[in-house]
Amino acid sequence: MAGQHYCLRWNNYQSNMTSVFHQLLQTEAFVDVTLACNEASLKAHKVVLSACSSYFQKLLLSNPCKHPTIIMPQDVCFNDLKFIIEFVYRGEIDVSQAELQYSSA
């Protein structure tokens, strides 16, 4: 005889996880990868980058060290990198039309 099964659900799970990961990024808690670009750098979490980007996933799988530093291609400017990371962590960003046109040029 099979017992009853229950579905346990965490309300707002996705928004909570997004908020927590963004907070961890802001406080640099548990960061385990550094992204370097144009003499500036920022820290992030390998699991978040890997989940959101096959590019980062391939790079990180091929370099399994504890805290790698990834040097971004020269055509990536630091401001664009910050926008990308914010988008990865929050799922949205606010940019001006001028910034979009500059980035696509």
Image (spheres, rainbow, N blue to C red):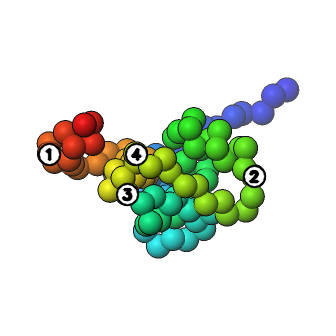
Task: Say left or right for 67 vs 77.
Answer: right
Q: Quadrant of residue 30?
A: bottom right
Task: Say left or right for 44 vs 105.
Answer: right
Q: Badge 1 local density, few (<14 within 10 Å), some, or many (20+)?
A: few
Q: CA distance from mark 4 to mark 3?
A: 10 Å
Q: Nearer the viewer, residue 59 or 91?
A: 59
Given this view, does label 4 or label 3 mark the residue nearer the observer?
Answer: 4
Q: Quadrant of residue 8?
A: top right
Screen quadrant of the N terminus: top right
| Mark earlier in primary sequence (4, 2) | 2
> Circle 4 sits in a helix, a strand or a loop, which is it?
loop
Label 2 near label 4: C-beta < 8 Å? no
| Mark earlier in primary sequence (1, 3) | 3
> Circle 1 sits in a helix, a strand or a loop, which is it?
helix
| Mark earlier in primary sequence (1, 4) | 4
Q: Amino acid at mark 3?
A: Phe
Label 3 near label 1: C-beta < 8 Å? no
Task: Say left or right for 50 vs 15.
Answer: right
Q: Badge 2 local density, few (<14 within 10 Å), some, or many (20+)?
A: few
Which numbered tag is attached to residue 75? 4
Instruction: Give x and y (percent) for residue 9.
Output: 54, 43
Residue at label 1? 98
Q: Amino acid at mark 4?
A: Asp
Residue at label 2? 64
Q: Amino acid at mark 1?
A: Ala
Tell me: residue 37, above or below residue 1. below
Residue at label 3? 78
| Mark earlier in primary sequence (1, 2) | 2
